[in-house]
Amino acid sequence: MEEIFALWQRDIIRFFRDKARFFGSFAMPFLFLIIFGSGMSGSIRSLLKGADTPSAMASFDYVKFMFPGIIGMVIFTTSIFSALSVVQDREFGYLREILVSPVKRSSIAIGKVLGGTTIAVIQGLLMFVFVPFIGLKINLSIMIKLIPAMFLVAFTLSSIGLLLASSLKTSAGFQMVVQILIFPMLFLSGAFFPITGLPAWMNFLVTINPLTYSVDMFKKIILEADKLDPLLRQAMGLNLTVLGHQVTIFNEALFILICGIIFITCALKKKGIEFCWQRKENETCEKWRKHREFSKWVDSFKCYQKLEDNIAFIQKNGVNEFEKIQKTRENLLKEMLQEFNEGCSKSYYCIAAAVLEIEELEEAFTKAKKDSTGLEIKGKSKVLHSILDEIAGRKNYYLKLRK
């Protein structure tokens, strides 16, 4: 769970630090909703007045009709493009740092998907700043239904993005493929016009489009479709049927959930995300060889002094045994930080816990507790430092990052 949280947290922090991305997310919805929506709304209103239409149709408001589609569009684009970070991390080296670790591939996938899901939901909720300007009434009961639906949709769409990212090697290729997918899926989802009276071939594409059910679910929740006049509901395309069956919100949520599980499973089976030492070409890969050679002398944000030993141990005993040892190291590190950290030794203790043997750490910890009885925290820290330095000196380890 810790690795999943770390990956999720990294994506969230990057989102809030990127001000251009944060504020830029309002641009496209603004253009569609205020400019395109307002223009079309006037045209549709004129057509309805000029035509012999029932009085129920007079209440049709195109901007209100389109708003749930805008929410779907924002969640869709954000979720899909969040997977671009997977491709970028692979290109620029961050993913390499993760892949040389014994973190499970499923944890990496879930962490990235949840990060993209959370960002998409946040950006979707930000769209509600437009609500006062379009005259739409949103109450608490609507939001209680809508937020879980947004999370479910974002999860599935992020899984689609991860599947694409695991299949493509470059950022340019990923963006090209995504651009090809985005507009057909959006326009065939009913986000911008009712999906009624379509040709048979187009109706088939609408039916197999996961975004169709996402947008329809948002519209039924936000517009409270069950309270609308049946004639108006039909005109808005809110009576979605598949094989003669009237699709309910529950049916849509279940379908979207199943799609999400299928896509994230396919992304894992695709093996676009896997450990370097698991690859068949791990002995011949030039990038992997250079990384291992470089790590013998230089660290990045973590210590690599035992990289080769760790790889050899995992290949011989398996990841599960390695994780047990790492858990013991983690517990010893927590004790050191709790009893011997004067406020300046966290990195030092982290490296010591990573490179020294378990028996050496336990021996040093026991001796330090005995020798530092009655001392204040600074004195205790000096005692443990001296013991760990002595052990590291005998084995030619450095208890600091080598830049």
Image (cartoon, rainbow, N blue to C red):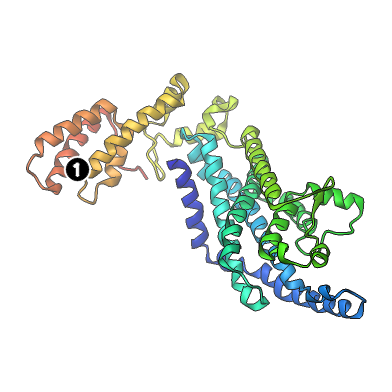
Secondary element at image label 1: helix
Residue lying at the far left in this picture: please name it. Answer: 374
At label 1, counting other C-alpha atoms closer than 10 Å, the crowd grade (few under 14, some 14-19, many 20 or more) is few
User: Based on the displayed image, in which of its 4 quarters is residue 312 positioned?
Assistant: top left
Q: In the rendered image of this protein, does residue 313 appear above or below residue 372? A: above
In the picture, the quarter occupied by the N terminus is top left
Q: In the rendered image of this protein, does residue 352 appear above or below residue 39? A: above
Q: Is residue 136 visible?
A: yes
Q: In the rendered image of this protein, does residue 129 appear above or below residue 328? A: below
- Provide residue 349's location: percent of width, then percent of height: 27, 41
Q: Tell which of 324 and 127 is nearer to you.
A: 127
Q: Is residue 398 visible?
A: no
Image-based side of 37 in relation to 293, left or right: right
- Provide residue 293's location: percent of width, then percent of height: 45, 33
Picture residue at 52% right of the left edge, 28% below the top: 277
Q: Which residue in the protein does label 1 denote?
A: 339
Picture residue at 19% right of the left edge, 28% below the top: 363
What amino acid does circle 1 point to? Glu
Picture residue at 57% right of the left edge, 43% below the top: 90
In the picture, the quarter occupied by the C terminus is top left
- Provide residue 78's location: percent of width, then percent of height: 63, 57
Picture residue at 47% right of the left edge, 57% below the top: 13
Q: Tell which of 218 and 72 is nearer to you.
A: 218
Q: Tell which of 316 and 138 is nearer to you.
A: 138
Counting every numbered tag in the picture gives 1
Image-based side of 172 in relation to 101, left or right: right
